[in-house]
Image (cartoon, rainbow, N blue to C red):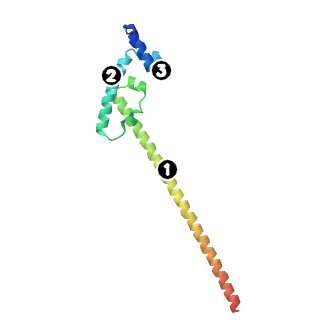
Amino acid sequence: MSYSLAGFTHSAFVLGYEAGISKCPIDGNSVPPGALITFVQKGHQYLEMEANLTSQSDTDVDEDFSFLQPLDLIKKDVHELRQMIKDKKKSQQKGREKEIDSKHEAECDRAREREKQDREKECEKDRKRIEKDEGREKQHEDHTD
């Protein structure tokens, strides 16, 4: 960590220990110098963006930011992050719409099947009633002959 080079060995150790950096799957060589400062600045921008989004809409902000990955927060600016959130929300909304459509279609199929079964039951009842009536008529004819 570059802070240990600047004489902040204890601070660098504490930050690394409390953040669990040793457990992180991110390769330390891929993190650019000064990433901590950048990360803190972007965190501040993130909070500003969160405040702006909250004031502009009634949506759940925590849900919106779950789209973001830690490396995105470090490497991308606010405009790119906003665009990522918008794109992911659109794709999620499309997914919800497809799910709703498929549920609606399934409900329609079940309703059609129920109607078909009801019609078949009615036809069966009618058929039995007709057979019963024919049987009575035949008995009546037999008694009258």
Q: Amino acid at mark 3?
A: Ile
Q: Residue 34, percent across and down? A: 37, 15
Q: Is residue 97 above or below residue 85?
A: below
First in sequence: mark 1 vs mark 3: 3
Residue ID at (40%, 40%):
90
First in sequence: mark 3 vs mark 2: 3
117 sits to left or right of 140? left
Which label sits on residue 26?
Answer: 3
Q: Is residue 66 above or below residue 116?
A: above
Q: Secondary structure at mark 2?
A: helix
Q: Residue 27, percent across and down? A: 48, 18
Please name whichever residue, 9 or 126, is drawn nearer the observer in this view of the structure.
Answer: 9
Examine the rendering and report whether any part of residue 2 can be seen.
no
Q: Secondary structure at mark 1?
A: helix
Q: Secondary structure at mark 3?
A: loop
Quarter holding the C terminus is: bottom right
Please name the residue that numbered disc 1 is placed on: 102
Choose top left, top right, bottom left or bottom right for residue 2: top left
Structural distance between the alpha carbons of marks 3 and 2: 20 Å
49 sits to left or right of 12? left
Examine the rendering and report whether any part of residue 116 can be seen.
yes
Q: Residue 104, percent across and down? A: 48, 53
Please name the residue that numbered disc 2 is placed on: 41
Structural distance between the alpha carbons of marks 1 and 2: 44 Å
Q: Amino acid at mark 2?
A: Gln
Q: Is residue 39 above or below residue 116?
A: above
Q: Is residue 55 above or below residue 101?
A: above
Pointer 2: residues within 10 angstroms few (<14), some, or many (20+)? some
Q: Nearer the viewer, mark 1 or mark 2?
A: 2
Choose top left, top right, bottom left or bottom right for residue 110: bottom right
99 sits to left or right of 52? right
Structural distance between the alpha carbons of marks 1 and 3: 40 Å
